């Protein structure tokens, strides 16, 4: 088993080989979900810079976006703030044959909203009461609900934040909210503990992913996800392409009639 151990980092060649194997299995899983009409929901929660997005990207890399999609909701609108709290998340739930990956979910209320004061104490306590029942309802309805919490150390989060500050391609990942949450590390830890104590239920338990080593976390999480949903290999037999029909009586219009983009990189 791959362990998140700084002394035993997986080599790049092995990581890429193992990741490709898992991604091939994810393709088989998606075909099975589609064929059997399953409904799968996977939640990805955790600290900022814990590696959730990297895992989601590797999961979806070769899957069909028609039946596997990411739900990453922005801050609620003024209208949405007046709705039942779970309403806008319920709209993202899958139909038969679909997989939905939540890049953060209804657990925003137990985390950022609680710590940053974006909800009242009454709203927070109501969430802790109603969330387990909401999730039991989902499971009873036939949804396969899987919840991952990505755990990153204080030191590793700091290193990743510093990396984002230095690299222009990653700087967009650092929002003012991320910086503010960095100052409230202990408050977030308390909120996470409280959240687990109320919502780590047998119908939908929390699975913790050690993510100080991103490569290990990706492999371990995808491997675990595959282990939770039994599936068979429905890979179709090799397809033989039919011959293209003859262009009898068809004359293509001149190329000069079309507008081509410039050959900036000839």
Image: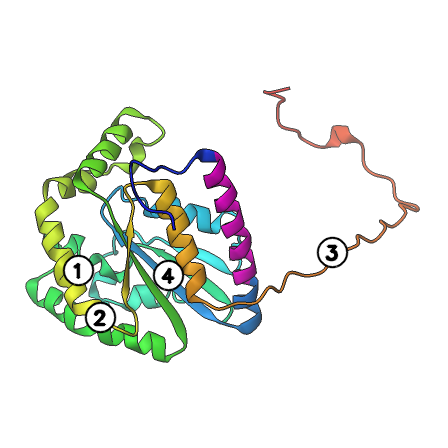
Asked if disc 4 and disc 1 are in contact, CB closer than 8 Å, the reply is no
Closer to the chain start, of discs 2 and 1, is: 1
* Magenta stretch: includes residue 19: yes
Q: How many marks?
A: 4
Majority secondary structure in the magenta region? helix
Q: On the image, numbered disc 4 is attached to which residue?
A: 42
Pick whichever, 238 or 94, lies toward us: 238
Dot 2: few (<14), some (14–19), or many (≥20) neighbours within 10 Å?
Answer: some
Q: CA distance from mark 3 to mark 4?
A: 32 Å
The kind of secondary structure element at disc 3 is: loop
Q: Nearer the viewer, mark 3 or mark 2?
A: 3
- From what the image shows, is residue 179 above or below residue 119? above
Q: Is residue 1 left or right of residue 238?
A: left
* Label 1 Cα neighbours within 10 Å, binned few <14 / some 14-19 / many ≥20: many
* In front of the other: 14 or 238: 14
- To which residue does mark 1 refer? 110
The residue at which mark 3 appears reads as: 238
Q: Is residue 161 above or below residue 222?
A: above
Circle 3 residues within 10 Å: few <14, some 14–19, many ≥20: few
Image coordinates of residue 42 in percent, x first then y, are 37, 61
User: Residue 131 — which label?
Assistant: 2
Q: Is residue 144 visible?
A: yes
Q: Secondary structure at mark 1?
A: loop
From this view, report whether residue 72 is shown above or below residue 176: below
Foreground residue, 45 or 22? Answer: 22
Callout 3–callout 4 Cβ contact below 8 Å: no
* For marks 3 and 2 on the same chain, the one whose residue lies earlier in the sequence: 2
Please state which of the two labelled residues, at mark 4 or mark 2, is closer to the viewer.
Answer: 4
Task: Give residue 136's position: percent from left, percent from top.
Answer: 29, 76
Say if mark 4 contacts mark 2, CB within 8 Å. Answer: no
């Amino acid at each position: 088993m791959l362990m998140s151990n700084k002394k035993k980092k997986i080599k790049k060649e092995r990581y890429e080989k193992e990741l490709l194997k898992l991604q091939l299995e994810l393709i088989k899983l998606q075909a099975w979900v589609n064929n059997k009409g399953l409904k799968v929901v996977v939640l990805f929660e955790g600290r900022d810079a814990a590696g959730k997005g990297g895992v989601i990207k590797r999961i979806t890399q070769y899957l069909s976006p028609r039946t596997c999609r990411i739900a990453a909701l922005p801050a609620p609108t003024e209208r949405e703030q007046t709705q039942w709290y779970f309403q806008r998340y319920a709209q993202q739930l899958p139909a038969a044959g679909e997989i939905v990956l939540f890049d953060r979910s209804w657990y925003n209320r137990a985390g950022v909203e609680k710590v940053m004061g974006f909800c009242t104490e009454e709203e927070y306590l109501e969430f802790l009461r109603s969330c387990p029942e909401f999730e039991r309802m989902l499971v009873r309805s036939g949804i396969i609900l899987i919840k991952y919490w990505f755990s990153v150390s204080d030191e590793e989060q700091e290193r990743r934040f510093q990396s984002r500050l230095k690299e222009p391609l990653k700087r967009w990942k650092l929002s003012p909210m991320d910086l503010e949450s960095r100052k409230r590390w202990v408050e977030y830890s308390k909120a996470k503990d409280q959240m687990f104590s109320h919502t780590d239920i047998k119908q939908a338990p929390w699975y913790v992913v050690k993510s100080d080593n991103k490569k290990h976390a990706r492999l371990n999480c995808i491997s675990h996800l595959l282990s939770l949903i039994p599936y068979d290999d429905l890979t179709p037999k090799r397809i033989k392409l039919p011959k293209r029909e003859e262009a009898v009586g068809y004359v293509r219009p001149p190329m000069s009639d079309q507008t081509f983009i410039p050959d900036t990189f000839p």
